[in-house]
Image (tube, rainbow, N blue to C red):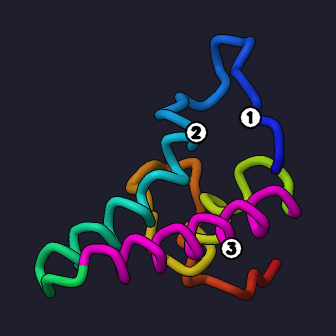
Amino acid sequence: MEPTKIPTKIDDPHQVLMWSADELVPMMVMITFGVMFERVLIFMLLGWAAVRVYRRYKNSRPDGFILHFFYWVGFLPDKGVTLVNPYKRRFLP
């Protein structure tokens, strides 16, 4: 079993029980689906598996990789003038 990392700095992610806040989202989504379909235990196990997969993926990449990926795909477009449109792939001089 892996030891639980306790945040020591102010900018560390928030911890909820044994998960960080972003790892809690897949678990809560799966529990919600479990309540809707009346199969809470099955979806809770699927949520636990999703958290393990997400944690392994997140720990193998640099910090902020997921946000950069969502920006690159176009899920986080910003109206600011400093950010380039994520759908523009080629830049000509």
Query: Alpha carbon of mark 1 to alpha carbon of mark 2: how far?
Result: 7 Å
Give the class, few, some or many, for how many residues have Cα within 10 Å of label 3's Cα (few <14, many ≥20): few
**Spot occupied by residue 90 in the image (x, y as percentages of width and height):** 73, 87
Residue in the foreground of this view, choosing between 87 and 30: 30
Is 67 placed left or right of 45 in the picture?
right
- In the picture of the structure, the residue carrying the numbered disc 2 is 18
Residue in the foreground of this view, choosing between 84 and 1: 1
Residue 1 falls inside the magenta stretch: no
Of the two numbered discs 1 and 2 on the same chain, state the one appearing first in sequence.
1
For badge 3, the amino acid type reads: Val
- In the picture of the structure, the residue carrying the numbered disc 1 is 4
Residue 41 falls inside the magenta stretch: yes
Q: In the figure, 57 relative to 16: above or below?
A: below
Magenta region, residue range? 40-60
Q: Do the residues bearing badges 1 and 2 touch, measured as CB atoms within 8 Å?
A: yes
- In the picture of the structure, the residue carrying the numbered disc 3 is 53
Residue drawn at 82 percent across, 78 percent down: 93
Residue in the foreground of this view, choosing between 23 and 79: 23
For badge 1, the amino acid type reads: Thr
Is 64 placed left or right of 37 in the picture?
right
**Most prominent secondary structure in the magenta stretch?**
helix
Q: Secondary structure at mark 2?
A: loop
Residue in the foreground of this view, choosing between 93 and 8: 8
For badge 2, the amino acid type reads: Met
